[in-house]
Amino acid sequence: MRPAMKKLSVLLLLPLAACIRFGAEPPPALLTLTPAAPVAAGQTQNSAAARSITVQVPVVPQELAVTRVPVQSSPTTIAYVKEAQWVEPPARLFARLLSDTLTSRANMVVLSPRQGFTDPGAQLSGELRQFGIDATRNEAVVVYDATLQRVNATTFEKRRFEARVPVTVIDANNAGPAINQAANTVATAVADWVRR
């Protein structure tokens, strides 16, 4: 190929190269959950002196299996908040929040499923049914269907926990804090139920 043709072909490909993007544009910031009652640093726990519990990562519907924040605008319509994205899937964030809340509020030794393989203590599992924004009511909503098997029990207890927090504007700046508040309300209620 002649040098002039080579230069021309490179120049023609430059605008096309500027249009190619690998992956989506990241949002300006990622959202996470923070416990209302964090675990104190340096606190040692022992399962011989305190009750233990194994916390499973909750099951989620498909709209929560991603890191985006869902907005329910009708019973059958779901969209996502523009530029709002969780740092990891909501199920793992919520399981970690439950673990911290059970540790600080219920004074329980929280085990992962792997740690609790030999002696799981009580077992908490469930389904995170809603974890987003209800646009029909302008509220952040968290709904968790918990299943608890207490130590040495052969039966299960089930209970639904729900919290709603008003949201003035449905955007990334308002959705995260409102969902965080609703998630902490649910986690506190779960801890109070489990420690009985």
Image: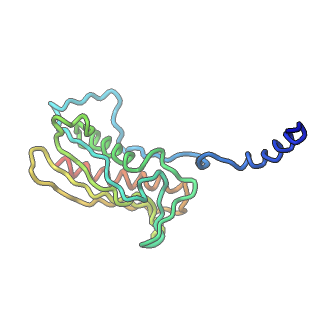
Res 44 quadrant in image: top left
Q: Is residue 88 visible?
A: yes
Q: Residue at x 71, y 50 (%)?
A: 19
Taking the image as shown, residue 101 lies to the left or right of residue 71, namely: left
Taking the image as shown, residue 127 lies to the left or right of residue 28, namely: left
> In which quadrant is the N terminus drawn?
top right
Q: Residue at x 88, y 38 (%)?
A: 2
Total count of labels: 0
Q: Nearer the viewer, residue 92 or 179?
A: 92
Percent position of residue 183, x then y: 37, 53
Relative to residue 22, is residue 185 depicted above or below? below
Taking the image as shown, residue 158 lies to the left or right of residue 58, namely: left
Query: Residue reaching furthest front?
Result: 1
Percent position of residue 48, x then y: 15, 30
Query: Residue reaching furthest right?
Result: 4
Percent position of residue 62, x then y: 40, 58
Relative to residue 152, is residue 62 depicted above or below? below
Q: Nearer the viewer, residue 10 or 108?
A: 10
Res 36 quadrant in image: top left
Relative to residue 181, is residue 101 depicted above or below? above
Q: Residue at x 31, y 51 (%)?
A: 58
